[in-house]
Image (cartoon, rainbow, N blue to C red):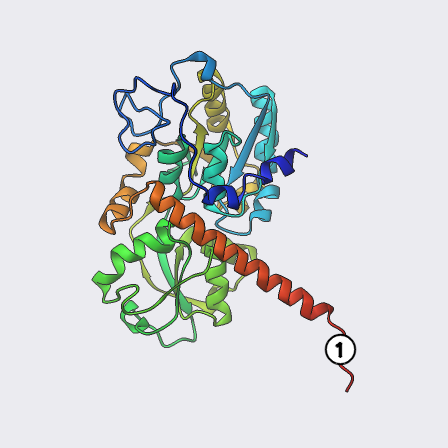
């Protein structure tokens, strides 16, 4: 029942206009910056402040966690089980995993109060901050540094493409409109390399980094810009063979997914969760699944996400409600198309064979 209740806030809820904030919410706010009207940023650190009214600070008996659906969401429910078990013991309350199928649904879940802890993808982190009151506090990493990734443009190894300029007139997959690595960064950087999206090629949204990689592997797309960490994990798991691909361009580093808390958790609870994250060391299986990372590093939105905001500014892609609603509709339409394709495939498989 709990999972069904959470599922009700999924994709369709995300495409609806955000409800108006309560009249009393942050009524005396002195500064909001880019945040939605429901939040205040009096200390100007670019994220939502904890509500000043203690009655509006939450202390849930069950904490809900979700991770960005940059790959098959079902993978993460198993991969993050050791972390959730540890958090339950460390924080002293139940922690459950909420499987989301889109970035929009994940942002909406936190905005509506049904999600307390989340790992947001790099680009959607800014939507989560501005529209859902998310407060990023950590990035996964190793003993030396936090993890970063590059935008890599992959092609099949047996293709003739050697540079971005060779992709003019070809089928190039972007992941989703809000993705930093899968859409915004390519739009900011590709023109300087002689390839203008929507002009030199038609952008085809695949719906995810793994779908882009698999599509290139299958020959559905000629190329795809994707996050290097996702591509490396897929190769390490054996989902694709690395030698079937060639990288023809890569960007400078960006931060990977953020781990964030809902802004309105009681300060004592939020601080306890942060400490538990930073004390945690990944077990061997989770290290393998997460690219060799073994811990969480402290992070702040204002500092670590500055390069991401710079890319969005360069392509005039603000992280506001209008952009979020547009992306939500695109994600919903893409999900509907995938469901229709699955249904058609199932019907074809179940159809009786015609007599010869």
Q: Could you tell me which quadrant the N terminus lies in?
A: top right
Question: In this view of the protein, which residue sits in the foreground, 170 or 57?
Answer: 57
**Residue under the image location 27 percent in, 39 percent down:** 306
| Residue lying farthest to the bottom in this orientation | 356
To which quarter of the image does residue 344 belong?
bottom right
Please state the horizontal and vertical placement of residue 229, each as a whole percent of the image: 43, 51
| Residue lying farthest to the right in this orientation | 355
SS assignment at label 1: loop
| Residue lying farthest to the left in this orientation | 192
**Residue under the image location 48 percent in, 66 percent down:** 215
Please state the horizontal and vertical placement of residue 8, each as a whole percent of the image: 58, 39
Q: Could you tell me which quadrant the C terminus lies in?
A: bottom right
State whether residue 147 appears in this view.
no
Question: In this view of the protein, which residue sits in the foreground, 19 or 268?
Answer: 19
Please state the horizontal and vertical placement of residue 290, each as a whole percent of the image: 50, 45
To which quarter of the image does residue 325 belong?
top left
Locate residue 245 relative to residue 80 in the image: left or right. left
State whether residue 214 appears in this view.
yes
Tell me if residue 28 comes above or below residue 305 in the rendering.
Answer: above
Tell me if residue 135 comes above or below residue 149 in the rendering.
Answer: above
Locate residue 193 relative to residue 279 in the image: left or right. left
Please state the horizontal and vertical placement of residue 277, each as a whole percent of the image: 49, 28
How many numbered discs sit on the rendered protein? 1
Mark 1 neighbour class, 10 Å CA radius: few under 14, some 14 to 19, many 20 or more:
few
Tell me if residue 32 comes above or below residue 225 in the rendering.
Answer: above
Which residue matches tag 1?
A: 353
Tell me if residue 5 comes above or below residue 327 in the rendering.
Answer: above
**Residue under the image location 53 percent in, 60 percent down:** 337
To which quarter of the image does residue 43 belong?
top left
Question: In this view of the protein, which residue sits in the foreground, 102 or 95?
Answer: 102
Question: In this view of the protein, which residue sits in the foreground, 38 or 115?
Answer: 38
């Amino acid at each position: 029942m709990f999972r069904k209740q959470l599922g009700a806030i999924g994709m369709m809820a995300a495409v609806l206009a955000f409800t108006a904030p309560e009249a009393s919410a942050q009524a005396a706010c002195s500064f909001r910056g880019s945040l939605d009207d429901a939040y205040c940023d009096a200390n100007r650190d670019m994220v939502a402040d904890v509500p000043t009214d203690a009655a509006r600070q939450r202390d849930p008996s069950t904490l809900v966690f979700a991770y960005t659906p940059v790959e098959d969401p079902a993978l993460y429910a198993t991969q993050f089980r050791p972390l959730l078990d540890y958090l339950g013991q460390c924080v002293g309350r139940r922690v459950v995993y909420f499987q989301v199928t889109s970035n929009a649904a994940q942002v909406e879940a936190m905005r509506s109060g049904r999600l307390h802890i989340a790992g947001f993808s790099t680009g959607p982190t800014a939507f989560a901050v501005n529209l859902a009151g998310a407060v990023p506090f950590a990035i996964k990493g190793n003993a030396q540094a936090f993890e970063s990734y590059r935008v890599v443009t992959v092609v099949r190894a047996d293709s003739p493409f050697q540079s971005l300029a060779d992709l003019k007139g070809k089928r190039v997959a972007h992941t989703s409109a809000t993705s930093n690595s899968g859409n915004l960064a390519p739009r900011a950087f590709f023109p300087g390399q002689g390839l203008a999206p929507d002009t030199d090629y038609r952008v085809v949204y695949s719906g995810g980094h793994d779908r882009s990689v698999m599509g290139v592997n299958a020959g559905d797309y000629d190329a795809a810009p994707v996050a290097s960490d996702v591509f490396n994990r897929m190769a390490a798991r054996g989902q694709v063979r690395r030698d079937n691909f060639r990288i023809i361009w890569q960007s400078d580093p960006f931060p990977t997914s953020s781990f964030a808390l809902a802004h309105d958790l009681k300060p004592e609870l939020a601080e306890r969760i942060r400490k538990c994250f930073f004390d945690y060391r990944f077990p061997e299986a989770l290290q393998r699944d997460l690219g060799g990372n073994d811990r969480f590093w402290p992070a702040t939105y204002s500092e670590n996400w500055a390069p991401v905001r710079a890319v969005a500014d360069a392509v005039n892609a603000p992280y506001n409600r209008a952009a979020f609603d547009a992306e939500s509709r695109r994600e919903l339409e893409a999900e509907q198309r995938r469901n229709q394709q699955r249904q058609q495939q199932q019907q074809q498989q179940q159809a009786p064979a015609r007599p010869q």
